[in-house]
Image (tube, rainbow, N blue to C red):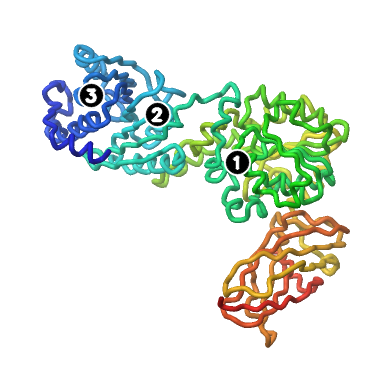
């Protein structure tokens, strides 16, 4: 496309000054702008759009350049008719009179910053030339990307804020962009080719029309936890999923679990490995294939994978003692959420079961917390977008959760409900410390437990606030390595399965200020420690007192060849290594292969 644009530009003789307004207060700059508008003419000639929308018309110079380049095109122009951002009150009236006399043009006076969707349906080209302060361009790009095959951003190089805003938007919306061409003209142009699959209707009324958007690309490049899945195929899971799983384990020893909107299936795998029978439900066929990849051969025997809607009664087995809904409720409409809670409540009632919910973002964060951060950033000369949503989040998050609404809806169907605010730094959040109003607004995540029996909040809180172990409890710890490789390469990373038994008073977890991690020492044949601080592995499962728990430890081999001895040990961060824990040494040869 760049070659076609440059070829058209080289033959272009268009001069915008012929039709410019003689009363334009910026008339002294006209000579500098000739090449600038010729480039817009060339872009229109190369693209040959049949319909165009322009945000920010002013005197209509860009609109005329596009229409001279593609005379049969229909153009809709919207303009706030304000003096800010290069605007000139009354200019759009002059533009309308000038353009409509020769071309198929409709001018609408409105501020694009107040719109949720641009007028009209889809366009071959949308020209973004409105509020060039970073925020305005970011918002206009959000709108244009839903309705345009090509987006031309004016002023890409005009201000630092605008440049940063456009680049931030490109990074967040990379799933929506086919290609970009940067053109260093007078103010800088960026031509964005969007993917044809973008031209969908966003569906605030319900989720079924969005089912086709839940693709492998979404699950492996955008959906939270995708990096961990790519590395381990579900063996290691991200903190959000891990917290949901661990809360579920504190509520009961689950025997029958339903994973709602299972996605890649990490939670399905987790509970199947704990011995539970799991119903794994997702309406995406791509998700179902990923769930099958996530489950190892042993785990599949306990799992019923269902490709269907969580709102369909036919996808469920009889009764469950635990349901998990991680990052699904914001993907459903309020009516759909209410129906889901009604169905799940009935399926849990007989066994006095519980539902664990996680949702992000906390809507209060977007409404109150982030705007405050944005203002603070501006004071020190930085820029932040108004809302940091990826393309898929904008498409799929049709009902981001207000905490009050979430609790109210759950309370309609469950007699006991506990909700708390959290973020990735502290999954316990408001459950384990006092929150001020500002803390509620800054929290990015919401957790909730809804149950048919009283909820032991102290027990859940203890999960997220691991106290320092007493020496007596530490001595009751035992780690048994199940299997190690006999030979590895220098600096090779590998995984070692271990069985953890513990006879102390409290559960062992990897949360709070003093989390318990599994790590290791390496010693050589002379019994000299060559690696003291090994890689840290969080406990994949909370370790219950008086029960054996299976974990997997990530290990990195020493850098030089030789015979070495590996000892896997627990370490409590900011407290001590528990070297007195019962743990056997494993001999492993490090050899260049």
Count numbered badges in the picture: 3
Residue picked out by circle 3: 70
Dot 1 or dot 2: first in sequence order is 2
Q: Position of residue 212 (x, y in %)?
A: 55, 31
Query: Looking at this view, is 45 or 290 the one in front?
Result: 290
**Relative to residue 19, is residue 173 depicted above or below?**
below
User: Residue 444 got which mark?
Assistant: 1
Quadrant of the rendered image containing residue 337: top right
Q: Residue at x 83, y 29 (%)?
A: 415
- Under tag 1, what secondary structure? loop
Q: Give the Cα separation between the discs numbered 1 and 2.
A: 27 Å
The residues bearing labels 3 and 2 have C-alpha atoms spaced at a distance of 20 Å
Kindly state the secondary structure of the residue where label 3 is placed. loop
Along the line of sight, which residue is nearer the eye, 41 or 483?
483
Say which residue label 2 marks: 144
**Tag 2 secondary structure:** helix
Q: Residue at x 30, y 14 (%)?
A: 106
**For marks 3 and 1 on the same chain, the one whose residue lies earlier in the sequence:** 3
**Quadrant showing the N terminus:** top left
Residue 528 point in image, percent of width and height: 67, 84
Q: Is residue 446 visible?
A: no
State whether residue 378 is above or below residue 416: below
Q: Is the residue under label 2 in contact with that under label 3 (CB below 8 Å)?
A: no
């Amino acid at each position: 496309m760049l070659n076609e644009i440059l070829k058209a530009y080289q033959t272009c003789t268009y001069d915008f000054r012929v039709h410019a307004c003689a009363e334009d207060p910026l008339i002294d700059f006209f000579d500098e702008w000739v090449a600038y508008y010729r480039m817009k003419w060339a872009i229109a000639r190369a693209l040959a759009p049949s319909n165009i929308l322009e945000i920010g018309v002013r005197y209509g110079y860009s609109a005329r350049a596009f229409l001279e380049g593609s005379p049969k095109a229909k153009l809709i122009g919207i303009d706030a008719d304000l003096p800010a951002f290069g605007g000139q009150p009354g200019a759009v009236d002059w533009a309308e009179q000038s353009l409509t006399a020769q071309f198929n043009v409709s001018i609408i006076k409105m501020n694009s910053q107040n719109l949720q969707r641009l007028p009209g349906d889809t366009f071959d080209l949308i020209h973004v030339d409105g509020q060039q302060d970073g925020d305005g361009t970011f918002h206009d790009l959000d709108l244009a990307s839903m309705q345009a095959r090509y987006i031309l951003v004016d002023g890409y190089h005009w201000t630092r804020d605008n440049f940063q805003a456009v680049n931030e938007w490109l990074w967040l919306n990379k799933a929506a962009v086919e290609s970009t061409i940067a053109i260093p003209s007078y103010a800088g142009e960026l031509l964005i080719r969007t993917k044809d699959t973008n031209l969908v209707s966003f569906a605030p009324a319900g989720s079924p029309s969005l089912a086709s958007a839940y693709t492998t690309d979404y699950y492996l490049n955008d959906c939270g936890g995708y990096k961990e899945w790519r590395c381990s195929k579900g063996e290691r899971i991200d903190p959000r999923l891990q917290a949901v799983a661990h809360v579920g384990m504190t509520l009961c020893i689950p025997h029958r679990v339903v994973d709602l909107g299972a996605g890649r299936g990490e939670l399905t795998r987790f509970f199947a490995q704990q011995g539970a029978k799991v119903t794994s439900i997702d309406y995406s066929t791509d998700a179902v294939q990923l769930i099958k990849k996530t489950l190892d051969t042993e785990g599949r025997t306990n799992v019923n994978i269902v490709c269907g809607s969580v709102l369909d009664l036919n996808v469920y087995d009889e009764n469950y003692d635990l349901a998990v809904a991680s990052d699904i409720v914001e993907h459903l409409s309020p009516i759909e959420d209410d129906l889901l809670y009604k169905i799940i409540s009935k399926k849990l009632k007989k066994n006095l079961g519980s539902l664990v919910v996680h949702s992000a973002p906390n809507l209060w964060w977007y409404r109150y917390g982030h705007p405050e951060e944005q203002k603070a950033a501006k004071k020190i000369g930085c820029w932040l977008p108004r809302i940091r949503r990826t393309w898929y989040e904008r498409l799929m998050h049709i009902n981001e959760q207000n905490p009050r609404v979430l609790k109210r809806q759950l309370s309609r169907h469950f007699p006991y409900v506990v909700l708390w605010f959290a973020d990735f730094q502290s999954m316990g959040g408001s459950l384990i410390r006092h929150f001020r109003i500002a803390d509620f607004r800054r929290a990015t995540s919401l957790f909730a437990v809804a149950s048919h029996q009283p909820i032991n909040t102290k027990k859940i809180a203890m999960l997220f606030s691991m106290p320092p172990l007493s020496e007596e409890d530490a001595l009751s710890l035992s780690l048994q390595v199940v299997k190690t490789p006999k030979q590895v390469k220098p600096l090779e990373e590998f995984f070692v399965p271990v069985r953890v038994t513990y006879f102390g008073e409290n559960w062992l977890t990897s949360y709070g200020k003093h989390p318990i991690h599994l790590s290791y020492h390496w010693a050589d044949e002379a019994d000299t420690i060559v690696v003291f601080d090994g890689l840290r592995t969080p406990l994949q499962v909370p370790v219950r007192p008086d029960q054996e728990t299976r974990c997997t430890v990530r290990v990195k081999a020493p850098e030089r060849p030789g015979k070495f001895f590996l000892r896997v040990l627990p370490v409590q961060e900011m407290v001590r290594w528990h070297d007195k824990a019962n743990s056997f040494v494993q001999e492993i040869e490090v050899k260049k292969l």
